[in-house]
Amino acid sequence: MKGLGVGLIGSGFMGKCHAIAWNAVGTAFPDVERPRLVHLGDADADLAARRAREFGFARGSGDWHAVVEDPEVDVVSVTAPNQFHAEMTLAALKAGKHVWCEKPMATSLADAEMMAKAARESDRIAALGYNYIQSPAIRHIGRLLDQGAIGEPNHLRIEMDEDFMADPETPFGWKHASTSGYGALDDFAVHPLSLISVLFGRVGRVICDMTKPYADRAAGDGTRRAVETYDTASTLLRLENGMAATLLVNRSAWGRKGRIAVQIFGSKGSILFDQERFNEFQLYTTSDSPAEQGYRTVLIGPAHEPYGTFVPAPGHGLGFNDLKTIECRELVARIGGDMAARLIGFEAGLEIERTVHAMARSFDEGRWIGLR
Amino acid sequence: MKGLGVGLIGSGFMGKCHAIAWNAVGTAFPDVERPRLVHLGDADADLAARRAREFGFARGSGDWHAVVEDPEVDVVSVTAPNQFHAEMTLAALKAGKHVWCEKPMATSLADAEMMAKAARESDRIAALGYNYIQSPAIRHIGRLLDQGAIGEPNHLRIEMDEDFMADPETPFGWKHASTSGYGALDDFAVHPLSLISVLFGRVGRVICDMTKPYADRAAGDGTRRAVETYDTASTLLRLENGMAATLLVNRSAWGRKGRIAVQIFGSKGSILFDQERFNEFQLYTTSDSPAEQGYRTVLIGPAHEPYGTFVPAPGHGLGFNDLKTIECRELVARIGGDMAARLIGFEAGLEIERTVHAMARSFDEGRWIGLR
Amino acid sequence: MKGLGVGLIGSGFMGKCHAIAWNAVGTAFPDVERPRLVHLGDADADLAARRAREFGFARGSGDWHAVVEDPEVDVVSVTAPNQFHAEMTLAALKAGKHVWCEKPMATSLADAEMMAKAARESDRIAALGYNYIQSPAIRHIGRLLDQGAIGEPNHLRIEMDEDFMADPETPFGWKHASTSGYGALDDFAVHPLSLISVLFGRVGRVICDMTKPYADRAAGDGTRRAVETYDTASTLLRLENGMAATLLVNRSAWGRKGRIAVQIFGSKGSILFDQERFNEFQLYTTSDSPAEQGYRTVLIGPAHEPYGTFVPAPGHGLGFNDLKTIECRELVARIGGDMAARLIGFEAGLEIERTVHAMARSFDEGRWIGLR
Amino acid sequence: MKGLGVGLIGSGFMGKCHAIAWNAVGTAFPDVERPRLVHLGDADADLAARRAREFGFARGSGDWHAVVEDPEVDVVSVTAPNQFHAEMTLAALKAGKHVWCEKPMATSLADAEMMAKAARESDRIAALGYNYIQSPAIRHIGRLLDQGAIGEPNHLRIEMDEDFMADPETPFGWKHASTSGYGALDDFAVHPLSLISVLFGRVGRVICDMTKPYADRAAGDGTRRAVETYDTASTLLRLENGMAATLLVNRSAWGRKGRIAVQIFGSKGSILFDQERFNEFQLYTTSDSPAEQGYRTVLIGPAHEPYGTFVPAPGHGLGFNDLKTIECRELVARIGGDMAARLIGFEAGLEIERTVHAMARSFDEGRWIGLR
């Protein structure tokens, strides 16, 4: 049996991340047939050829259509800028390829709906790049919830913060224009929503407040230009299961680099997690004797699948790129027919997009908005 | 010069806390004349006599009026249950005594307004027991904000959580009846609001969501009784200065014991604080060189007033009761005419009560409520 | 019954600390008769009178003999400089007073032996001010060890570090002269040895290395003077029970303010503690299920005696001075005949002094030294 | 130009780790020509063929000599059990191959000396697998020391602890027999020594104490067998530069999974690091203003080379295997003539082995042992 033929569109941050995953997946996971790296597409032919050589792809093209139409390609990684996601995935699905598209799904809800429809009507796998759901800690937290380790969950808080927009001296850029979307909602809120999706299910209703820490920024021409997107978004939520939750995101939060802080409270304990230290989680359980109850800091190890396939000794740590390799393994397994593989497909991805748009609307209208 | 004559009403948790403070204040603070512990009142004469002996008061009475009317008493600590605050403080002010009343101010907004009016019309000092504003860390954070250490603050998050209501097996008690108030709003939200009051000023508008983690609890008679108060309250706020903030409280949060987690983001850095480790705070500033920027964990020491009057060596730690001793010193100083003393007076306390009631109303009506 | 009559010699750092404890002990501990603060002695009569007024003592004297000989005094707190400990405690014991002497016991082993002999031959209580053994966390750790919570302990590491000598620009002072003792051994090592004493018993043999981070310091006269004491001392130990241990101390450790980090490893778990956060400890136990094993951070609360007498809610925190109040309670209880009271008496204190001298000798001779 | 031809001997834990690195290095590092994975050798031909397919090697052999003699192989990864290191590396060097050998170098000092001699006499690169020196944090700490960020370093403490030997119920295994070496010294002490080697230089003298937490263990036949190796080793050191240091290792330390805790104290600050959270380090510097001095927790990011080649956003985290990929890049660069590449060569590796043997001797003889 020969491995999957891989096409990759884009070779920037996430393109390289996909490339590292495609190179590693067969080595790290003995249960996955080593894929063949076939075709890399990027903006121009020279760059594509250079990246193909670096990343181990057989050939490169300056036109992404060549990747999508390559008969040796079975699955296409779409890592190009967000506004191209719809066109590329639709073309790939039409050409009979499986699709692995980076988040967010699309720049409009209409596009996302079209993509979900195309995926639904095909017999191909269409998955989104929500890698944070893949970490051994998050997977284990899911198991703990299923086992009732903290009883019945009754409250949830998630924060996601970074500081790449925090400097008021940073000039006006494309992410400050409303054409890029709402701001922190698109950049960040979708990630916590992917965690809610796999751990707790669907969102019922929301009310959101958003702010612009800096009203304007230096434009290139010596003037100031009004910022059109929101760096912070704070949302109260009710999940469909009735649980109350809060989702707070901020891309101007000085000091935060990759924080996704999760607090889950239940009737018999609670669980804490922070993506900045994603090789550990904290568990508090009332089954410990009263004078010794406290948050246990559990270091991830072979007891937390699939850590052990990377390192057999506990506490040695996975990296961000390893999460993508796990995601890649899940994709290959799903393509191979494993329905238990853990992925955010286009249907679940569409639900996340709908929630984000509802948040924005609740801010505009100053009131709670129901998802359905 | 002889010291202030002190009366104390109540000798439970907070009564003992006041007693420890009145015993310590003269010893710890050389700038304060040692007070005279005159008269302790409690529910019955025997208990009052016993506590007076233990706590070092000259005499005890089973009727609080005797304390209020004792001519040797200059200032009255009111630590009786919340429903008595109004009657006692009004009587004390009328008798010409200064008042130090535990929070919350009263069980109704009308009572709180009456108390504030009485204080305004007297020439006595009337202060509330908001001790968390007194910690050296919070004081220093205030100075850092004033100095622009993190530039212009633009976002605030506060959480206050404990777990004394977290056990679903705890039977129905008075705090589960609506006669006790709203629930977590009264128990907890007032504390973060006291911090907002001293650090950032007044609240402009709010929208709150509240939940009951457990719908009912065992009643004494073998039946279940519906819980009427809310253990969680999650609020989006806008301050009068325009800043957005979130205030999340939960008294059913397993694992949290005395958490008041504060995150303040500004244009040049950020500050973190948690009351569970109130002898430290964290500062992130962009004035550090880029490759060495990170949250500094600053241990409180003599550089953070008034720590040094308790211990001259840094990092040795103050305790919860020391915060009350500091508050006591501020009260004595204010009575002595020091207008710079740091206290939540009845006027600021009333503003806190109004905010709490606005939160509750925003929940009832499902919309933003303005404070004015 | 009237309370103990208290005399206090010295009103500096530790004198004030004793004064705070004597003021608080009756209020905090209902089982202790409130002491009477009788007589304070300090270097001159004016200072003594002022401090007596501040600290609540009935009278003050410029001559410590007046305190020791005061017939109303039952117990004498000795907090004067180390070189006076022997003379003062011997006089107090001879006058039939109980003694509470600050650590270290004396400046020479001969003095310490004389003090222990005097105490042994008297019927008075003679205790040393080793307050770190009193914290609820350390007490609870002792109980956990006794209960076998971590199985059979087999390895111990203790570090004690501060940074008050870390600045090379600090001029030569009395603590840099060999007349003050060895250096970090006297200042610090005695504290970890007090913990070893209560948790594990006696030391068997030691080998120590010591260093001077700064060879010389500025003398007042513009010249440099060679430093004669050692700021670091690193020791390998074997306890009498066979356990191996390490004891590392450093008073020039920039960044450390009051660190006493303890690591105890056993056959079924381990325990961590750090005095800089002494309101918590960490427990790892193999009785937790494998995928959820981790260090639990236990916040001190009413389950950890005697925290609850200070604050009934967990996680609110005790302070450094509260440890002294607990020590004071133990002293009063022991004077009252309670043999279970937890104290480092003069006999155990002498053993600590002997260990320190053995460490110094092992450094001088470059070899292991047995204690007996 | 075609990439290096790679041979790999062994496909267990470290063999897979090398394989992941060889697969990733070209993708992650654009400055490195993508290597060709040529030949994998393992214990039998079937296993070797299977692993070759999984790991992406062109062919596999059941005899390691075939790998060493393969003319397409330029560099050989030696990851077979320690007792084979000498024979394999000598054969590879003799065949004109570069060598990348896992630590420890060999099972006897004589073998290590022979290996170092062979490397010295060849014109090939011979490097050891000390991956912890490669982390961005450790590299940055090295730069900070060079820049004087903490002034003149004067004290060092390193601990390395795991718990894979902590369970007394684990039966007697080959690591409990003296034929495997000394115990924790071989397993662990060599790693901290590699850090000392790159950060501070050579060790001058040592005195070590070692213990066996469990005297005997269950043998297969129902009897108990005496343990011959030492799970703990505690060492006092003096470096050649005069600095005092401590090196404490324990492989029976319940709760520790991959701890390498480093504390470096200097005249103007200090640095902390722990491998269990190797994506961060802590810096304390006196150049911060006094009231805001504290340990800064710096999250690793693009400012800390070569993190940025893996992820362009800070705080997202590298994993254990990424350290090996960095090491691999350094090896390829050194083979390509880059003398600045960071590696522990056979000469430095031999010095580490000598230090370990000196430690063992100092324990046997109960006295300080000089390295030269």
Image: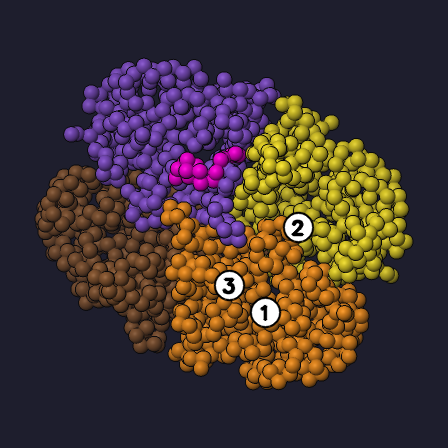
Chain colours: A orange, B brown, C purple, D yellow
Q: Residue at image x 37%, y 40%?
A: C136
Amino acid type of the residue tagged 2 in the rendering = Ser
Q: Residues within 10 Å of mark 2 (few under 14, many from 20)?
A: many
Residue under mark 1: which chain is it in?
A: A
**Separation (CA) of disc 1 from disc 3:** 14 Å
Same chain, marks 2 and 3?
no
**Separation (CA) of disc 2 from disc 3:** 31 Å
Q: Secondary structure at mark 3?
A: helix
Q: Position of residue B337 (x, y in %)?
A: 23, 49
| Marking on residue D135 | 2
**Contact, CB < 8 Å: mark 2 with mark 1?**
no
Q: Position of residue D55 (x, y in %)?
A: 75, 59
Q: Position of residue D127 (x, y in %)?
A: 78, 45
D212 versus D263 height, above or below = above
| Marking on residue A142 | 3
Same chain, marks 1 and 3?
yes
The residue segment tinted magenta is C140-156
Q: Residue at image x 50%, y 17%?
A: C372
Residue under mark 2: which chain is it in?
A: D
Is residue B258 covered in magenta?
no
Q: Which residue is mark 1?
A: A340
Q: Residue at image x 44%, y 27%?
A: C201
Residue A328 shows in this picture: yes
Q: Nearer the viewer, residue A194 or A27?
A: A27
Q: Position of residue A191 (x, y in %)?
A: 54, 69
Amino acid type of the residue tagged 3 in the rendering = Gly
